[in-house]
Amino acid sequence: MRVSHVPDLSARDLQAVLAVAEYRSFIAAAACLHTSQPALTRIIKRTEDVLGVRLFDRTTRRVEITAAGKEFVAVAERMLNDLSISVRSMREIGEAARGQVIVSSIMSVASSVLPRIAAAYRSMRPGVVLSVREGVHGSVLEDVRSGFADLGITYVDEVPEFVTATRIRREVFDVVLPRTHPLLRGAGRRRRPLGLGMADIAAFPLVSLPSDSRTRRLIDAAASGAGISLSHVVTVTQFATLMSFVRAGVGLAIVPSGSLANARGRSLVVRPLTRPRLTHHLGLIRLRDREPTPAAAAFAVLLQQRWRGQLMQVPQ
């Protein structure tokens, strides 16, 4: 585009034309624009000179818009609207590139999924400080409800009305055992993992999460429904600690598959829990009446894209 062909008109000039066209009065238009009538008259006169056409016919009693004026008003409205949208988009890009995002997440996701996603997010937006708060389902809900966290990552099969939930992936439950556990005797070198049922597990001690955790409640409910009583001999609050106790031979554990990053190593074996097959859905939550910041919204988009396509590494 040749600069000499671009008319020398500002957003203020366009606003002046629109105000006069709307009010059909220089006095009223000047008041709306917080300027004087003579100043507004000079703006309109200069605009008409730049365009080479008369936009308004003025008499002592009235202001009438010309045919050229009507056509230019439509152009001016479109130009100002496009400019407003562009400025808003630029501001959102700037806000997304800096600031802080607070994510409250259940422990299994925080330790397995979030590190790689956080690394990708930081490479895209190095100016944003990312804070991750680990906890159980109840604490994640409270962090989101109170407004402390921008986003929450937790179980989304049943959530309260104050949050908006997005399902991202389905998670199953597995059994983690020491490699020398009696349940593994005779398994040999089978190609396919040998599934274990609640009835198989009931005779052995378990290392478990607290009874008020959603994971523990789901496991206990499934066992109760099958008429089985499980032996929870040790209770811990962290998956990493739970795996250490299993590794030491204290007992076996039933855990969601997302926590298996802590089960790596030759001393542990993972087998699917097949009877019954427990599942739940994980996803993203946010406060229903709170719009996420541009930085938080960008993190949510990246999380959904990366998490849906991420495969868990299951040690054997």
Image (spheres, rainbow, N blue to C red):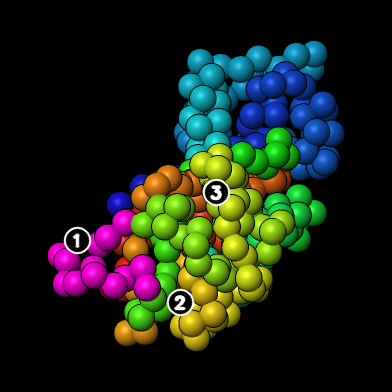
Q: Secondary structure at mark 2?
A: helix
**Label annotation for residue 192:** 1
Vertical comparison of 164 with 178: above or below: above
Q: Residue under label 3, please give it.
A: 228
Question: From the viewer's perspective, is 142 left or right of 281?
Answer: right
**Label annotation for residue 262:** 2
Q: Residue 194: within the magenta?
A: yes
- Which amino acid is tagged 3? Ile
Residue 170: x and y, percent? Answer: 42, 48
- Which amino acid is tagged 2? Asn
Q: CA distance from mark 3 to mark 2?
A: 27 Å
Q: Residues within 10 Å of mark 2 (few under 14, many from 20)?
A: some
Q: Residue 96: within the magenta?
A: no
Rendering quarter of residue 158: top right
- Which amino acid is tagged 1? Arg
Question: From the viewer's perspective, is 177 left or right of 151?
Answer: left
